[in-house]
């Protein structure tokens, strides 16, 4: 699902307000992603025989941490406050990651696929919205989106869709991500 670009609101300061929403929600999303992988690594990271997935999770977490660091800098540079719900997203992300990892490797991958599918559509909408107004940021978001797609594709290759209760798991996680996006833009 691709988010439709949000038309700029009329009035003074509307473009700056929309940019703040974009940066705030993207920062929140990357923060959540880092904590999802932390939760998954807490369960699977040192488990015997799980070296392959442990390496994959570490690599994906490192990329998410790079994205988060970039959004940290953008928030500071553009004087945008982060979401007030950052502590909630840290806890929720860790719990989601650990919970799916406790269900097994395939469920952990199903979590990654569900999250990254939503994020791909989210970033695609922002890239379209920013293409003319802020092409530099749009290009960065395109790179991040491509890395998120690589995470999703890896998860599918590793059997995400073979997870027990995959359809329900993916639907619940996707709905949660979409709700978190809407909330984090504003709060």
Image (cartoon, rainbow, N blue to C red):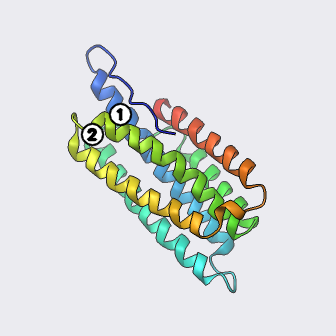
Where is 92 relative to 8, above or below? below
Q: Which residue is the site of mark 1? A: 20
Q: Residue 112 at what x, y percent from top left?
A: 58, 58
Where is 14 relative to 21, above or below? above
Mark 1 touching mark 2, by CB under 8 A?
yes
Q: Residue 32 at what x, y percent from top left?
A: 54, 52
Q: Taking the image as drawn, is residue 81 in sight?
A: no
Judge by depth and name the residue closer to the eye, 111 or 66.
Answer: 111
**Residue 67: quarter of image:** bottom left
Callout 2 environment at 10 Å: few (<14), some (14 to 19), or many (20+)? few
Callout 1 environment at 10 Å: few (<14), some (14 to 19), or many (20+)? many
Q: Residue 135 at what x, y percent from top left?
A: 21, 42
Which of pointers 1 and 2 lies earlier in the amino acid sequence? 1
Separation of residues labelled 1 and 2 (CA atoms): 8 Å
Q: Taking the image as drawn, is residue 49 in sight?
A: yes
Q: Residue at x 50, y 31 (%)?
A: 187
Q: Residue at x 55, y 70 (%)?
A: 57
Q: Residue at x 40, y 33 (%)?
A: 21
Left or right placement of residue 149 versus residue 104 in this view: left
Q: Give the numbered dot on residue 78.
A: 2
Left or right placement of residue 97 versus residue 2 in this view: right
Judge by depth and name the residue closer to the eye, 77 or 140.
Answer: 140
**Residue 164: quarter of image:** bottom right
Left or right placement of residue 121 versus residue 57 in this view: left
């Amino acid at each position: 699902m691709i988010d439709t670009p949000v038309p700029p609101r009329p009035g003074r300061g509307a473009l700056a307000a929309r940019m703040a929403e974009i940066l705030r929600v993207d920062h929140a999303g990357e923060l959540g992603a880092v904590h999802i992988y932390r939760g998954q690594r807490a369960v699977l990271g040192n488990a015997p025989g799980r070296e392959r997935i442990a390496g994959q999770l570490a690599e994906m977490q490192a990329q998410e941490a790079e994205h988060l660091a970039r959004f940290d800098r953008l928030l500071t540079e553009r004087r945008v406050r982060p979401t007030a719900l950052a502590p909630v997203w840290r806890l929720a992300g860790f719990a989601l990651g650990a919970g799916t990892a406790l269900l097994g490797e395939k469920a952990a991958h199903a979590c990654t696929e569900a999250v990254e599918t939503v994020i791909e559509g989210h970033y695609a909408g922002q890239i379209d919205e920013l293409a003319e107004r802020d092409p530099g940021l749009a290009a960065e978001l395109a790179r991040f989106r491509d890395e998120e797609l690589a995470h999703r594709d890896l998860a599918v290759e590793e059997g995400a869709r073979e997870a027990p209760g995959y359809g329900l798991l993916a639907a619940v996680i996707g709905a949660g991500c979409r709700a978190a996006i809407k909330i984090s833009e504003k709060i």
